[in-house]
Amino acid sequence: MAKKKKASVIEELPPAPIRYQPITETLETNYMPYVMTVIVSRAIPEIDGFKPSHRKLLYTMYKMGLMNGPRVKSATIAGRTMAIHPHGDAGIYETMVRLTRDYEALLHPFVDSKGAFGKQYSSNMKASAPRYTEARLESFCNEIFKGIDKDAVEMVDNYDGTMQEPVLLPTTFPNVLVTPNMGIAVGMASNICPFNLAEVCDGTIAMLKKPGISTERLMELIKGPDFPGGGLLIYDRTQMKQVFETGVGPVRLRARYRYDKEANCIDILQIPYSTTIEQIIDKIADLVKSGSLKEVTDFRDEIDLSGFKLTLDLRKGVDPDKLMTKLFKVTPLEDSFKCNFNILIDSAPRQMGIAEILREWIFFRMGCVRRELTFDLSKKRDKLHLLEALAKVLLDIDLAIRIIRKTEKEEEVIPSLMTGFDIDEVQANYIAEIKLRHLNREYILNRIAEMENLRREIAELEDILGDELKIKAYIAAQLTEIKKKYGKPRITQIMDAGEIKVYNEDESVENYPVKLLFTSEGYFKKIAVTPRTQFSIDDQKMKDGDSIIKVLDAENKDELVFFTDKCQVYRSSVNDFDALKSSAMGDYLPTKLKMDEGERPVYMELRNSYPEGENYIFLFENGKGVRVPVTAYVTKGNRRKLTGAYSDASPLVAIFKDTDKHPTDILLISSADRAILIKSSLIPLKTTRTSGGVQLMNVNVKKGHTLAKAVTDFEGRYQNVKSYRKLKIPASGTLLEEKNIEIQQIKIDT
């Protein structure tokens, strides 16, 4: 008997209805909170010059007592920081590395480090694991924490409410302009370059005295960015003024070097802050391999304990200054730092110039000073309040003792003192807590003597707090002291842009006459021509089956153009190729010019200019042709490759040149041995490079006939060429006399 199936315990539920959410709602509820978190809590620095990760790390180290104590393991610091910054110890350690003295990324480091922390100028030099390195705070950090224990800034709960942390650090100088900062948020970024501390202090003091200071005056005091890596700042006043006024613009930097005459080498000692030694070496290596940097025989990284050094060995007779001018143009030895002063002000990002940043910092700093002075004032008032009670006790110490002695219950002591001396509860508690040994006349008189000093100090604080100018003078005095204590000479030297020598490739290239050979298999050969040279095509070594299709007389400074069968143009300089002997096969162009796979060159010419009225003529297998002005091939910049050089509708047969004033005769021959002779002026001129052209010769496509060849040097190669002349297009071809049996028979009979 078949078993009955058990009823399903779980009932099938109907599918949940699909809820379509408008894209605007998705952005508002899901995406915008993430965007705001990245902008406000991660990537963009605030007016104190720190991102949250920097601030939380430094504050943790401050609370650990690392301002004056011995160094501790970096792993311990990273672990403790997670109490207020729960983003993993690896990320915290990376943040600390960038703030260390050893990493060399800051003009004024915040972390005194011991161990291998890597270098800012190298992507390969990494920091050791945090269990091996040690750190503590630099004494310079006194200036970013001063007043933090006096309520100078607002404190908030950490993420789990177990401790408090500062919203901002009460920096006593405009750290936002002294410490470099870079951050990429969502839809915006920040890139702040560092300035010299002493110059920033001078500029801030000037603005404290005269809030409406002009940009020109500010530029005299703060001369320009000062990068930790040094280098040369190429000073363009117009661009620098733009950076000062808007906070946006490029700052050009170049490396500093020295020439060792005995060793015939260049030692590069400082590089732009925005690049690394690996990027420079990779670029130099590429140039050496491609033959574009023949002046350098060897190069090496010589970084050691004494600092940065990149050495270039030179060929004999090379001018080091001219070589460096070339390297500044073609390598990252000259680079740009793109300024973007985007800073959070009251949790809102603002792009500001330097003057506006200083005004915002002064406003912030005045708030910190007010809070700090108010804290001090409150403490002094409280102390004075207690001492005033002590002064009353001085008048009758015996009464105080009798009151305490005769009071039966402890809780009645305070009320009895309040009644006996006419003091409040706080004062009474203070009197009651005085030790018996201190109830002597000398102790009480010494304490009361402080009252006059306290009253004077309280009056001074109230005077400062009540006068904005005095608060500014207080801040200016602090800045003067900071400049005196921590100011350093500029590391990045300034060079006027007008003094910069621009690299001229023609000046650095030796010029001499050459012969250029181009073969059907795509080989190219450059042969230097001297009075003793005996050039012969027959002496040239070639690949089996290859043949020379073009020979040009040129100079080493000339420019070359190569058209390929893939509708592309490659530009090159004659100087890019080494001069070879007749016994050499030559350079294989697809490899030398890095052409696409399967691509081969079909046409070569010298092209030093692109004059009006000169044209290229393209002829295709389908019998069509077109003329294109050479001006259509002019490009912005020094582009080495141009796509879409001509139409790809039909395979290319030939390329020629003509001018509007001097058309050329072209003989077109089909695969059916038929020919026409036309003037190039009959071919329409099109400004679009990829135009397919018009029909020039009628070829019988149905029978598989095509345009087979086109020649301009037909004299002596073909019989009675003038008989093929056509005055209109399209035209049908006439059978070549060489292929016409009747004509050949007549010639034999005669």
Image: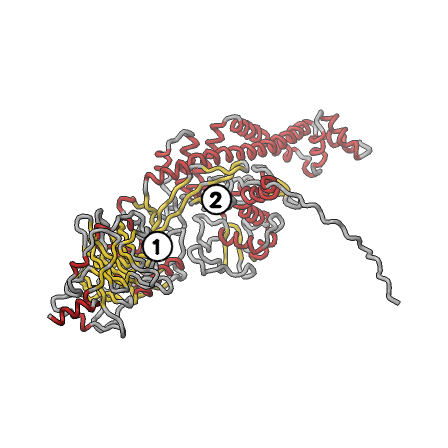
Element type at mark 1 = strand
Residue at figure coordinates x 21%, y 47% from the top left: 613
Q: Closer to the camera, 460 or 318?
A: 318
Q: Is residue 150 left or right of residue 538?
A: right
* Residues at discs 2 and 1 in contact (Cβ within 8 Å): no
Residue 704 drawn at (x, y percent): 33, 63
Task: Point out the residue furthest to the right here.
Answer: 1
Find disc 2 in the rendering and name its residue: 189
First in sequence: mark 2 vs mark 1: 2
| Residue 264 visible within the image | no
Q: CA distance from mark 2 to mark 1?
A: 35 Å
Q: How many numbered tags mark residues here?
A: 2
Q: Is residue 548 above or below residue 82?
A: below
Vertical relation: 171 (above or below) 427: below
Residue appearing at x 47%, y 58% in the figure: 118
Please indicate whether residue 139 sits to the left or right of residue 415 in the image: left
Q: Position of residue 19 (x, y in %)?
A: 66, 43
Mark 2 vs mark 1: give the one in front.
Answer: 1
Q: Dividing the picture into quarters, in which one does residue 714 lie?
A: bottom left
Left or right, 615 with reference to 594: left
Q: What's the residue type where badge 1 is placed?
A: Thr
Asked if residue 746 can be seen in this view, the reply is yes
Task: Report the amino acid beneath label 2.
Answer: Ala
Mark 1, residue position:
643
**Quadrant hosting residue 433:** top right
Q: For the residue carrying disc 2, how many other residues have a C-alpha within 10 Å: few (<14), some (14-19), or many (20+)?
A: some
Location of the C terminus by quadrant is bottom left
The percent position of residue 603, horizontal first and vertical second, equals 26, 60
Few, some or many residues within 10 Å of mark 1 (<14, 14–19, 20+): few
